[in-house]
Image (cartoon, grey):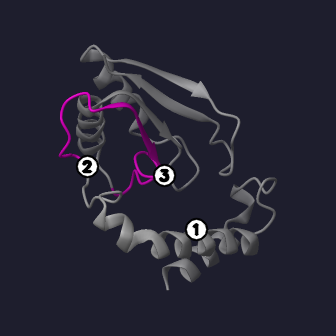
Amino acid sequence: MYTLKSLSQMINNKNSYVWEIISSVEELGNIRMEAMNKFLGDYESGKRIGRYLNESLPTLPFSDNSFELALCSHFLFLYSEHVSQDQHISSMMELCRVSKEIRVYPLLSLDGETSRHLRPVMSSLRSRGIEVSLEHVSYQFQKGANQMLVAKCV
């Protein structure tokens, strides 16, 4: 089971995390299971009424400027070993197409280091006239993950 595998990895790497809001790997497991069960309990009815869509970056089915804000959590930058720099850039450009502002968190890869894609992505966005900045966040679970990327797309 994925959850057991990920939790065993958390145990092996527990010194890479800040255990203040969540006090232990066991508590994290309980929180994740509760969230998963809540989602699964809502999924079928949510899918029927259009609350859940099966779409993925870098191509989204929304019109230009459909949203004020797009949030990307625990995908871009975190999986830098699996998602190429070009995929990061095309995903960010697509999010900019559909939203006026993007916020991405965390900016560290799974190894706890700043993603090697962060600076090139920021540079690419700036070269296209998109205002980007790094902003401090008060939440930190992965040690050092205390910044988010903010892109102002319009």
What is the crowding at mark 1: few (fewer than 14 residues within 10 Å), some, or many (at least 20)?
A: few
The residue closer to the viewer here, 115 or 76, is 76
For the residues labelled 2 and 3, the Cα–Cα distance comes to 14 Å
Which secondary structure, mark 1? Answer: helix
Which secondary structure, mark 3? Answer: loop
**Residue at x 18% of width, y 35% of height:** 63
Q: Is residue 12 something one can see in this rendering?
A: no
> Where does label 1 land, which residue?
35
**Residue at x 43% of width, y 45% of height:** 77
- Where in the figure is residue 24, as x and y percent of width and height? 78, 68
The type of residue carrying mark 3 is His
Q: Which mark is drawn over residue 74?
A: 3
Q: Which mark is drawn over residue 57?
A: 2
Quarter of image, res 35: bottom right
Which secondary structure, mark 2? Answer: loop
Q: Quadrant of the C terminus?
A: top left
**Residue at x 40% of width, y 70% of height:** 43
State if disc 3 and disc 1 touch (CB < 8 Å): no
The type of residue carrying mark 2 is Leu
Quarter of image, res 11: bottom right
Magenta stretch mostly in which secondary structure? loop
Quarter of image, res 50: bottom left
Q: Which residues are magenta?
A: 57-82
